[in-house]
Image (cartoon, grey):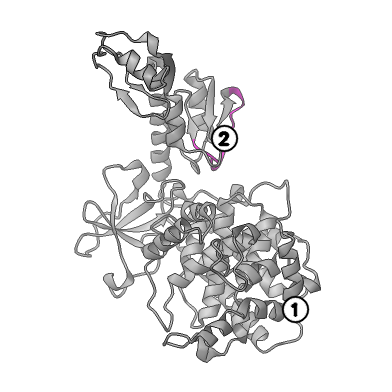
Amino acid sequence: MREIPVNILKPIPALPGALLHKSCSLLLEKGDRLSPGIVEVIRSQGVKEVWMLEARESLDRVQRERARVPVSVESIHPGEKLSATIFDKSGRLLFAEGTIVPKGLVKALRTRGINIIYRRARKSQDDIRQVRAIRDAIVAERRALLEAEAAPPVLFDEASADEIRNLRLPVARWNDFIPAKLEAKLNRRQPGIVETNDPPFADRIRDTRVFRRVSKEDKVTFSNIVIGSLRSTRELLTDLATEKKQIDLYPIEEVIANVMAGIIHHRDLLTLCSSAKTSEHYLVAHALSVMALSVNIAASMGFSTAQIKALAYGGLLADVGLLRIPPHLLNKQEPLTPAEYARIRQHPALGLNVLQGIHGLPEEVPFIVYQSHERGDGSGYPKGKKEAIIHTFSRIVSTADCYQALCSDRPYRKRLSFYEAARELVVMASRRQMDVEIIRAFLDCNSLFPIGSFVRLSDGEIARVLTANPGAYDRPIVRKIWDSNFRPVTRPERIDLKETPELSVIHAFADGELPNRYNHFIGF
């Protein structure tokens, strides 16, 4: 945990860790915005320092440890009334506040080897007043932001796309696309991520939690970005499938620049459009949605713009090896034979062969293409590598690929709902098949009830998920759409479930449970 003097505390668009008062009371959660106004309120309350949790620290554990004061067992006397609850070293309750100390307690504790006990620290009235004032200011600021009825129109800025398009990256060598050569690097644990002092890409992403409505112009703009990206992706895959000798890098640059710029200006709208499955070709829609989700996950993990651009290439091209697999195997409805499954498992190596015709790809791409179907527990393919030898970008793309595949209809199974797919990723992380940190980042940007999905609230009404609340995976921001009988509500209210404890999600809908027809942008 890091102590930050308030005189050097600065506004932050998205906190990298939870912010605590010195009394250990939570002020802001990871991912929340620390605005100039809130910084000023903290200073005005006479707070001298605040604490910020580090990446892997548990809020519950820190609060438990900081909220107790060590005292000698000799300080308690038989017959006295305890003025505070006391615990042992591991945090187990010994006696509650108000208990009369029995005879022989000190001796019994010493017999068990306990010479130091812990009492719950009392918060001063000043601490309570400061925390209440800061929390009231945070709630008031969020309410004021939500009262703005519309986001600024025409969010997409071509300058951002141009900047990303012109960003140059270290290029892969020709022998990185030869499986045996790549394997040698992997076995030497050479694959890494290019270090950079550039600021995180996430710092550029607008906080969509403050937007009340999306303008009509933006919906058209973002739909067109995705339609154009799907068209370019389809043309790219067609060229690769026909084994065209030279592939132009420019169309790939265009797709990546436009999607990354779209995420900067409204990540939720871009996510909604890219998940619409508007292409008749599964591989086309899958490639684009995997790329967009991979960018969002990596942004939540703090990677820079250049690092994420390299990752985006890998996300878009991860499954190009499937172009070398006979269509009758990919579309087979019956279970695959062992020989057929072995053929499918060859597609990462085949993908490297396919990409030999594209010059200038970032150096991370061959690792992503070759390893995006490996699993942390060694159960993946093509080589059954374990987490330590799987490139971080491969693990990110693997998460996005698995989620998008689960959300898609396949010849051999029906798709899962968004919620069921997200829950399956959490289960896979518990088995060490997926990286826990990456699943946490996925939930930060997508929530347990992903953007665009429909949920029933505890008051019976039906809402659509608009955006995630980082750290509060089961309490996204939603808009009420229908009443309990799927009739349009009179007032489509926007609700931040994180700030509305009396409401919660009690059911996540699958497609078959929803009305047959509804506007794709309903609620946004």
What kind of secondary structure does the magenta stretch mostly adopt?
loop
The secondary structure type at the circle numbered 1 is: helix
User: What residue span does the magenta drawing correspond to?
Assistant: 7-18
Q: Quadrant of residue 64?
A: top left
Q: Quadrant of residue 215?
A: bottom left
Residue occupying the point 24% across, 51% down: 458
In the image shown, does 151 or 502 lie closer to the viewer? 502
- Can I make out residue 312 in this image? yes
Dot 1 crowding, Cα within 10 Å, few <14, some 14–19, many 20+: some
Q: CA distance from mark 2 to mark 1?
A: 46 Å
Q: Is residue 452 left or right of residue 270?
A: left
Q: Is residue 41 above or below residue 203?
A: above
Q: Is residue 243 above or below residue 437?
A: below
Q: Nearer the viewer, mark 2 or mark 1?
A: 1
In the image shown, does 229 or 392 lie closer to the viewer? 392
In the image shown, does 288 or 192 lie closer to the viewer? 192
Residue occupying the point 57% across, 90% down: 326
Q: Which residue is mark 2?
A: 11
Dot 2 crowding, Cα within 10 Å, few <14, some 14–19, many 20+: some
- Tag of residue 356: 1
Residue occupying the point 34% across, 14% down: 107
Name which residue type carries label 2.
Pro
Q: Is residue 13 above or below residue 450?
A: above
Q: Is residue 343 above or below residue 309?
A: below
Queried whether the magenta region covers residue 15, the answer comes back as: yes
Where does the image place residue 322, in percent across and percent down from the top left? 59, 82
